[in-house]
Amino acid sequence: PVKTGYGQAPVNIALSKYWGKRDVALNLPTNGSLSISLPELGTETRLSWHETGPDKITLNNEEMAPEAPFVKRLSRFLNFFRPDANGGFDVETLNTVPTAAGLASSASGYAALVKALDDCFQWQLAPRELSLLARLGSGSASRSLYDGFALWHKGERADGLDSYAEKIDQTWPEFCIGLLEIDTSTKPIGSTQGMQQTVNHCELYQAWPEKAEQDLATIHRAILDKDFQTLGATAENNALAMHATMIATWPPILYWQPESVAAMHRVWQLRQEGVTVYFTMDAGPNLKLLFLETETPALMRALPEMKCLKPFA
Ligand code: DP6
């Protein structure tokens, strides 16, 4: 007898970032984080459980080699859920976003996978419990269980049972995200390894957890108040502070390309000219712009290559 399941989940962009773990095995973060989901981009996963193994993983219609790091990480995650050790999962994953290009495909990937498992084994878990399980696959996946804004609580417990994300009750139809794709090839160092290196080899990192919690609270408040300028300025500063800890690590981690820096200057120049636009960046060279709908025409004129997404459309 074969059991099957289906799940899908959106990509999310952190406005206040997760960078650093207090427990590496359980993906327990040093600080809380807050994100916005992009329903137009994400992952769809079909899964089946067979009584004889091994696992078979297909990504974007291509079967992956068993020794690929992507497959090893996935199979290790699936070990949490195997009804018996001899069985195997057949996982078919389709991404509508380039894998590992700093667009958080692991987030939508593990969130979709957990939903597919829930469907396959008929657990009927609540979103908060699914968020907790997705976190075990990739920290940022905890936030991809929801549309709109999500807040991942860092939690205090050693077992991580209080470290899950919740939806923030606010819709903001005018809210836009602009993608400025600088380079979509695979990044030199993944976020899992990058944050470990920062935690262990960066003196500036000591200042990060407290700042991150303050930014999180400021952005949360700004969302509830629909105070866009506070949200944008705090999110941009939070991303730059995170990148400052990466740069100050030894050996240094610099995800920026010359074109990333040029794009930052462009955003600052546009702000000087009166356009209300901010940016955020993750573990990659691409920029994600934050703005309200009223600024779309000015931005499309200035940056015709920008892809405009509407999280609440
Ligand atoms: C810079 O969730 O990819 O995008 O938990 O090791 O899988 P793991 O890390 P991951 O880290 C994301 C880091 C970030 C910031 C963020 O999304 O909050």
Image (cartoon, rainbow, N blue to C red):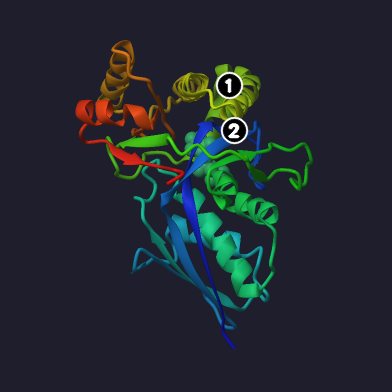
Percent x, y for residue 141? 55, 48
Residue at image position (64%, 21%) is 214
Question: Which residue is label 2 attached to?
Answer: 20
The disc placed on residue 205 is 1
Percent x, y for residue 290? 41, 29
Q: CA distance from mark 2 to mark 1?
A: 9 Å
Q: Residues within 10 Å of mark 2 (few under 14, many from 20)?
A: many
In terms of image quadrants, where is residue 89? bottom right
Foreground residue, 48 or 44?
Answer: 44
Indicate the amino acid at tag 2: Gly
* Quarter of the figure that contains the N terminus: bottom right
Mark 2 CB within 8 Å of ligand 1: no
Indicate the amino acid at tag 1: Tyr
In terms of image quadrants, where is residue 183? top left
Q: Is residue 195 visible?
A: yes
Percent x, y for residue 114? 59, 61
Foreground residue, 196 or 146?
Answer: 146
> In the rendered image of this protein, does residue 25 appear above or below residue 233?
below
Left or right position of 127 against 184: right
Left or right position of 60 against 206: left
Q: Is residue 290 visible?
A: no
> In the rendered image of this protein, does residue 171 appear above or below residue 255?
below
